[in-house]
Image (spheres, coloured by chain):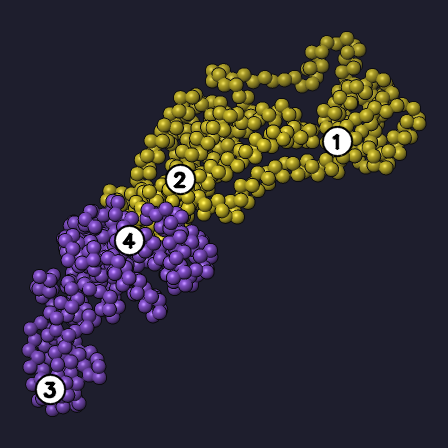
Amino acid sequence: MAVIRREYLARVRTRWFLISTIGGPLFAIGLVAGPAYLAQRSQGQIRRLAVVDRTGALSAGVSGRLVEGGYRVESAGTSEEAERELRRRVQEGEIGGYLVLDGQTLSRGRAVFRTRSSPGTVRSLTIRGAVVESALNLRLRQDGAADDVAALLNGGELEVQILGAGSETSPGSGLAAGFIGAFLLYIMIIFYAVAVMRAVIDEKADRIVEIIISAIRPWELMLGKIFGVGAVGLTQLAVWLLMGVGLLAMGLPAMLAAQQGLVSVDELTAALPSFGLVALFLAFFVLGYFLYSALYAAVGAMCSSEQEAQQAQLPVVMLLVVPIVVLSTTLENPDTGLMSGLSLVPFFSPILMFARAASGAAPAWHIGLSLVLMAATIGIVAWVAGRIYRVGILMQGKRPSVPELWRWVREG
Amino acid sequence: MKSAGNDQPAVRLRGVTKRFGEHPAVLGLDLDIPTGTVCGLLGPNGSGKTTTIRMIMGILFPDSGKVEVLGASPGRGWRHDIGYLPEERGVYRKMKVIELLGFLGEIRGLHRRDARARALQWLHRLELGDWASNRVEDLSKGMQQKVQFIGTVLNEPRLLILDEPFGGLDPINQDILEAIVREFRQKGTTVLFSTHLMDQAERLCERVCLISRARKVLDGDLRELKRRESRGVLALEFEGADGWMRGPEVMEVERAEGGFHLLLREGADHGEILRRGLAAGAKINRFELVEPRLHEIFVKHAGPAAADADPAHVSLQGGPP
């Protein structure tokens, strides 16, 4: 329909849309990858280390740890000549330094690191950790201790098993996905719903609305606007999704993981949302957007200027703020009756139910019920909003009082 | 479609009433606009013209009474046969001129390519051809008005409804607009426009409907109305004092054509005025009952003096036979 097309094109063609859609993720990636890249550039040489192992037993273990930590390690000979060569390479900046392991390393965990400039704390810790761990491992094995003592020394491991829900998501990643996803939902819904309100106010202020509703019905215009703006939001999400998939395919996470030296590839992939969660995100976005954009369209129709609208939209904003306020509580205790109840309230569902679903705490029937409830509420809200809209768009001047609004709804 | 005597009127209002809260906007309005005529809806500001037009367009709904447009009630398929220029005109300022016109054509049922082709023709005709790819906000106010007008007629409407179309236009563009309205009239389009510019209405209209304070005061064929009202205006030219002109018979005195026009009350005896003048010693050069200008009819029935008249007087002026 013409209205949808116009709304869509009018927005997608703006420079702003291009910047936020393409630039947003680039910015986010840049935020993560930029420092890593810079670090890598400046440390390209520094991250190359050599190991001189006079004990003849430690180099394999130490090198292994250091490689895991993101270093490139070479073994060097123990002769005087070889060490002179290493000194030269350090001074010329070819390698970041070399590590000397000897008897003291085995007995007391002491090693010497020869470098040109003082290493940072993290580097010192990483190298020291690698040395101590390997030495300890060797000593334990020499003393005949079993592997399990080594495991104990390594700090053990806590495996968390969730009973009942039967979900396979690990709680850590669910928490992150729930939090980030819920917040993104909040921002996207409020952003595009407010865009609908703006469009309504602009049309009122520009006085073009009368021409249009002489040709098409007001509710058609309202729906056209909502669909048009919503399509823009979906386009944006689709672009983001494609970029995300593209980056995954290009192996960016692996690159990141390698460079940061902090997280492993497995951890990163585990934190990525599952396909089902993405679908759920889209569903909650679409329904939440419809719900709130209808409310915002009605608010826009009531007001004659944006300043006025800022006050008038307060009750609607409150509806969106409540779930954000209780979001962290929800993520901590997603199973309590109160949270189940709150997350089933259609106005809160997009954010709270998504968060619960992402953390794996919401049974499927809760999610289904909330989607059905939201759809039903959308029907009611759209009907009421449509009536307010049809009267409101022709009004100029004073904002209506609540009784007047009620009259609009009845008479509309 | 050309004859004014077509059976079915393009617009028919019966007993239409609309109130906003306590405030009556239109009270018991009956109106017929025969197909193929140009009809002026006249009245002072706030008399209910725009409300009437909005009810005809199906934008507002009457509290009571019946509205029929092109033989049907408003709100259905006929929207595509109507061109509407609201009083409060708007544009999408950020759109390009040609895109805006394409959109306006499209919502009135044209194919987009069609709409754009027609829009280009119109733009060239109104000397806006070079502006088609500009944003609307780059245009001057007058140019924007022309664009709005193009948007109104793009779909070759059978019924053209223009709310104060001449407001804010310079004389040259007013003439252009008048010419186009006449052209549509030639093609058989019914035109209803509201105005408070009586000269314009006098030149363009075959019929007028005069409303004041939410009620219809007069309507009918303009020439016939003038004939009916012809005993109501006295043209005077004289030398000497002028105090004798005013009296119980005279509603209003206006300067006109080197003398005065006196608007007479219904059934007034103009002989009385002549007697007073002679008694006052005026040298009277002209004393003639003339055909009133529309402006004078307007003032007589809707001016401040008419407000004092009793309601019976108003209803007496009702529709033509």
- Left/right placement of residue A410 relative to residue A195 reads left
Q: Mark 1 points at which residue?
A: A123
Q: Do labels 3 and 2 share a chain?
A: no
Q: How crowded is mark 3: few (under 14 residues within 10 Å), some or many (20 or more)?
A: many
Label 3 SS: helix
Q: Along the polypeptide, which appears first: circle 2 or circle 1?
A: 1
Dividing the picture into quadrants, the one containing residue B1 is bottom left
Q: Residues within 10 Å of mark 4 (few under 14, many from 20)?
A: many
Q: Name the residue under label 3.
A: B277
Which residue shows up at 17% across the image and 66% down it?
A: B222
Q: What residue type is labelled 1?
A: Arg
Please, which chain is the residue tagged with disc 3 on? B
Look at chain B in the picture and name its colour: purple
Q: Which amino acid does label 3 sit on?
A: Gly
Q: Which amino acid does label 2 sit on?
A: Phe
Q: How far apart are marks 3 and 2 (CA)?
A: 75 Å
Dividing the picture into quadrants, the one containing residue A38 is top right
Residue B22 placed where, x, y %? 20, 54
Which residue shows up at 38% across the image and 36% down it?
A: A291
Q: Mark 2 points at which residue?
A: A227
Please, which chain is the residue tagged with disc 4 on? B
Q: Name the residue under label 4.
A: B157
Chain (yellow)? A
Q: Are marks 1 and 3 on the same chain?
A: no
Whether residue A75 can be seen here:
yes
Please, which chain is the residue tagged with disc 2 on? A
